[in-house]
C-alpha cells in the first residue's frame, strides 16, 4: 500500500501532476502519429478516431479528478455511491461513443477504441515510471 510501506510517506500530488502532463504530451504526439499513419496506410479515418479516443480519455481523466475532489470528505473518505455513479456514467458514455462509431463508421470507431486503450497504456507507463523513480529517491533518503 502506498504511503504505509517501508518508505513511510505518501506519493506527492506534484508527481501526479507531472504524470498527467507527460501523458498529455505523449497523447498529443500519438494523435499526430496516428493521423500520419492512417493517411500513409490508406485508412484516413483511423487517425481522427484515435484523436477522438484520446480526447474522450483526457476528458474522462479530468472528470475523474474533479469527481474525486468533489466526493471526498475533509477526512479523506470517498463518498462511494455518487462517486461510483459518476464513474459509471462517464465510462458508459465513452463506451457508447466508441461502439456507435464502430457500428456506423468502422475505421473511425476502431480508431476511437484504439485511442481509448492507448491513453490508458500511456497513463499506466507514465505512472509506473514516476512511482519507481519516486520509490528509488525515497529509498536513497532512508539509507
Image (cartoon, rainbow, N blue to C red):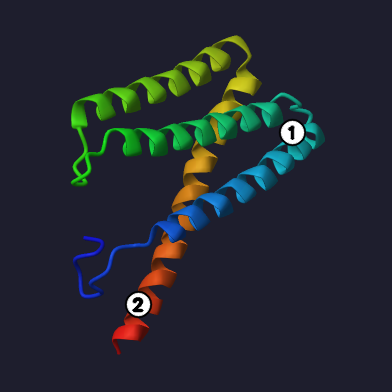
How far across and down, in percent of the image, does residue 14 sit?
45, 59
Q: Quadrant of residue 47?
A: top right
Callout 1 crowding tier (Cα within 10 Å): few <14, some 14–19, many ≥20: some
Residue at (32, 33) in percent of width and height: 70
Residue 138: which numbered mark, if any? Answer: 2
Residue 24: which numbered mark, if any? Answer: none
**Side (left or right) of 124 relative to 81:** right
Q: Quadrant of residue 112?
A: top right
Residue at (27, 29) in percent of width and height: 83
**Side (left or right) of 88 relative to 125:** left
User: Mark 2 falls on what kind of element?
Assistant: helix
How far across and down, in percent of the image, does residue 50 sit?
63, 32
Q: Residue furthest bottom?
A: 143
User: Mark 1 falls on what kind of element?
Assistant: helix
Q: Residue furthest front?
A: 74
Q: On the rendered image, what quadrant is the N terminus found in?
A: bottom left
**Side (left or right) of 25 relative to 9:** right
Q: On the rendered image, what quadrant is the C terminus found in?
A: bottom left
How far across and down, in percent of the image, does residue 65 sit?
40, 39
Q: Which residue is mark 1?
A: 38
Q: Nearer the viewer, residue 24 or 109?
A: 24
How far across and down, in percent of the image, does residue 69 sit?
34, 39
Q: Is residue 95 above or below residue 17?
A: above
Amino acid at each position: 500500500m502506498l504511503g504505509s510501506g517501508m518508505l513511510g510517506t505518501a506519493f506527492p500530488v506534484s508527481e501526479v501532476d507531472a504524470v498527467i502532463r507527460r501523458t498529455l504530451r505523449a497523447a498529443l504526439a500519438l494523435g499526430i502519429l496516428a493521423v500520419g499513419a492512417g493517411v500513409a496506410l490508406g485508412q484516413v479515418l483511423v487517425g481522427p478516431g484515435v484523436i477522438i479516443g484520446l480526447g474522450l480519455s483526457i476528458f474522462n481523466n479530468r472528470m475523474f479528478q474533479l469527481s474525486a475532489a468533489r466526493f471526498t470528505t475533509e477526512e479523506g473518505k470517498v463518498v462511494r455511491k455518487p462517486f461510483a455513479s459518476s464513474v459509471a456514467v462517464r465510462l458508459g458514455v465513452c463506451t457508447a461513443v466508441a461502439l456507435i462509431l464502430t457500428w456506423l463508421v468502422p475505421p473511425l470507431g476502431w480508431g476511437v477504441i484504439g485511442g481509448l486503450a492507448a491513453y490508458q497504456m500511456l497513463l499506466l507507463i507514465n505512472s509506473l515510471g514516476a512511482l519507481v523513480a519516486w520509490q528509488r529517491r525515497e529509498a536513497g533518503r532512508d539509507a
